[in-house]
Image (cartoon, helix red, strand yellow):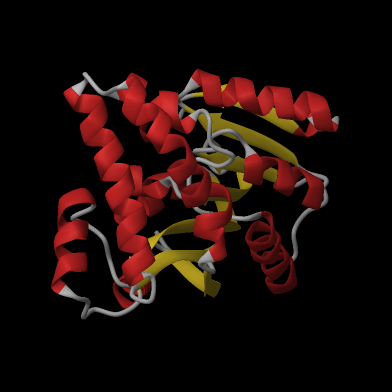
Amino acid sequence: MNHIFFDIFEKLPRVGPGSNPATTRAFTTLKEKKDLPEDLKILDIGCGTGTHTLQLAELCDGQITALDNHQPFLDTLQKRLDQTGLNGKVNRVKGDMKAMDFEPESFDLIWSEGAIFIMGLNEGLREWRKFLKPGGGLVLTDAFLFTPKVPKELRDFWDRIYPGILDTGQAKTVIGESGYKILDQFNLPSSAWWDSYYTPLEELLPGFRKKYADNPEGMGLIAALQEEADIFRKYSDYYGYTFFILEREITAD
């Protein structure tokens, strides 16, 4: 199944919802809320093919460690770095976000767009915190319900694909209990889901239906991806990605 997943996602402009304007807004907000060092050290967890990584490199003069566990994604990032001349600002690292061996408190900022769901918000925040300097920033996106009460079809969908999904109120509680202060938050607009993710995905799916017509696993994955786009088309008022801009509390244990 994994090879089919990557066969599809390696061909997308982005491997999840997001946009350069949203990345810029989040980073600009962070700069407005706290003083950042000139030699900013950033850990980008789950960088994928690096679309937002490159945007971060354009926005700051710091050094970015871009981590992902899929080498072809990192290879694509390298090609993009070669094209933009940003090689000196980004260090690619193949690794598992659940087993990182960086030095404790070695980063000023941890950035993660659309990847923390792999660990879950609670575990991710607590595990990653040890790599962040006291008072350092953590900026993330994840899928959240905008309200606790949602239509049954939508609830059933999330119970199948992400049983641990939280509403934004629950997320705020988890964030506080994990030793962080919320500096700001905002929801991604629908365009950040469609322009570089769902629209190109739906354009690719017919070709993959032909390619994997005799592969039940492949057809199951393709059907699941189409369902995901259809659910968002129908229920985007009830859920989406939220950017949380956080600060590690200095006094928390």
Is 14 placed left or right of 239 in the picture? right
Return the x and y of residue 165 as percentages of the image width and height.
Answer: 26, 60
Residue 49 position (above or below residue 243)? above
Give residue 151's position: percent from left, percent from top: 19, 75
Residue visible at 58% across and 54% down? 195
Viewed as shown, does residue 220 lie left or right of 119? left
Residue shown at the point (72%, 32%) measured from the top left: 90
Does residue 150 sit above or below 227 in this rendering? Answer: below
Give the quadrant of the C terminus: bottom left
> Residue drawn 69% across and 38% down?
64
Residue situated in front as seen by the camera: 37 or 203: 203
Can residue 102 be seen here?
Answer: no
Q: Is residue 253 visible?
A: yes
Considering depth in this image, is 91 or 209 the residue closer to the camera?
209
Foreground residue, 31 or 73? 73
Residue projecting furthest to the right:
85
Which residue is at a point 30% across and 80% down the rendered structure image?
147
Q: Quadrant of residue 176?
A: bottom left
- In the picture, measured across the screen, residue 4 lies left or right of residue 53, that is left
Q: Position of residue 145 (x, y in %)?
A: 32, 70
Q: Quadrant of the N terminus?
A: top left
Could you say which quadrant of the image residue 148 lies in?
bottom left
**Residue 228 location, x and y as percent?**
31, 52
